[in-house]
């Protein structure tokens, strides 16, 4: 469809449909939604990338907040685990948002495409089962980064804990910075950091990732709002779609294996990353 001849109301409807699906996928895979929203909308919709990045932060924030009560009640998200990591990430995301708005759009498109494809490759190479922590490190013990949840898939209570806490704090600071630059929820990196680096079970990593995103995105979102990079035509239908989809995804998370959705996410990220990279290079407008 030619953006110049399409009626204006087509784009809000298309955004609502897209974000409803993204809300389901984002919660089940623990990726926030912004990581798919920004490259897909920035590549295939006729909106300036700054507006798309601003909407992407608010979108990921709304989706994770909609799912948070269900995840907390199911003990798939843990506040003791989330708060120290989110503090490091939220401070870094503020600086990332300032840097992202100062860069030329083409540079951000190229960097976004390369980053999304690299993360898709990382997700493909990462063992989704991870290496679970059997003992807490000293800082993790002080912060009491441990808990338990009931897994209906195996009909048993799972006791868990984390390790490598200092490395985890550093990783989440980096995740917050890049999330602010690109306007992404950065859940694509939260889950590997929690699961592979810190040794949390996959379902706890996925559930806690949503709460981390909701805190990390807030400082960066205010920077985009202050700079006028938030367009209601994009934000309103997107938030409605992501919130409705996220509540469906939160219910599916308890019983659906994340591996199936993980494959879909990898393919979608590769396609969106290639499109963003080519658009930044003026090869495919």
Image: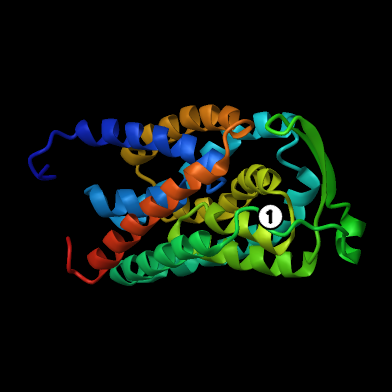
Task: Say if residue 11 shows up in the picture.
Answer: yes
For image coordinates 79% across by 33% down, the residue present is: 156
Quadrant of residue 158 within the rendered picture: top right
Q: Residue at x 72, y 49 (%)?
A: 201
Crowd around label 1: few <14 · some 14–19 · many ≥20 (10 Å): many
Q: Position of residue 244 (x, y in %)?
A: 47, 27
Does residue 56 show up? no
Residue 154 vs residue 83, the one in the foreground? 154
275, above or below 6, in the image: below
Towards the viewer: 224 or 41:
41
Q: Position of residue 4 (x, y in %)?
A: 9, 45
**Residue 90 against residue 27 in the figure, above or below:** below
Q: Nearer the viewer, residue 166 or 96?
A: 166
Query: In the figure, residue 276 lies in which quadrant?
Result: bottom left
Q: Residue at x 35, y 43 (%)?
A: 231
Residue placed farthest to the front in the image? 154
Marks counted in the figure total 1
State whether residue 222 is above or below residue 101.
above
Residue 199 image offset from top left, x and y in percent: 74, 58
Report the side of 264 relative to 233 (left or right). right
Residue at 12% x, 42% y: name it.
Answer: 1
Q: Which image quadrant: the C terminus?
A: bottom left
- Mark 1, residue position: 86
Could you tell me which secondary element the residue under label 1 belongs to? Answer: helix
């Amino acid at each position: 469809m030619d953006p110049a001849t399409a009626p204006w109301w087509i784009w809000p409807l298309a955004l609502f449909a897209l974000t409803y699906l993204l809300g389901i996928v984002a919660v089940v895979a623990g990726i926030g939604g912004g990581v798919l929203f920004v490259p897909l909308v920035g590549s295939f919709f006729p909106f300036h990338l700054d507006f798309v990045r601003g909407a992407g932060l608010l979108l990921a924030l709304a989706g994770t907040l909609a799912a948070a009560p269900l995840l907390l009640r199911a003990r798939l998200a843990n506040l003791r685990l989330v708060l120290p990591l989110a503090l490091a990430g939220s401070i870094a995301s503020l600086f990332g948002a300032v840097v992202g708005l100062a860069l030329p759009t083409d540079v951000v498109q190229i960097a976004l495409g390369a980053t999304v494809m690299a993360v898709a490759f990382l997700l493909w190479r990462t063992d989704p089962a991870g290496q679970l922590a059997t003992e807490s490190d000293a800082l993790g013990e002080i912060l009491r980064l441990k808990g338990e949840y009931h897994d209906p898939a195996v009909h048993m209570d799972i006791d868990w804990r984390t390790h490598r806490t200092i490395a985890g704090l550093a990783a989440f600071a980096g995740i917050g910075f890049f999330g602010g630059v690109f306007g992404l929820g950065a859940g694509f990196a939260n889950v590997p950091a929690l699961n592979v680096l810190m040794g949390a079970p996959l379902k706890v990593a996925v559930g806690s990732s949503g709460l981390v995103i909701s805190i990390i995105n807030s400082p960066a979102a205010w920077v985009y709002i202050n700079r006028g990079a938030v367009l209601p035509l994009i934000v309103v239908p997107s938030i409605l779609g992501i919130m409705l989809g996220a509540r469906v995804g939160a219910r599916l998370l308890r019983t659906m294996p994340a591996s199936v959705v993980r494959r879909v996410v990898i393919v979608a990220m590769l396609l969106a990353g290639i499109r963003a990279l080519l658009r930044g290079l003026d090869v495919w407008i």
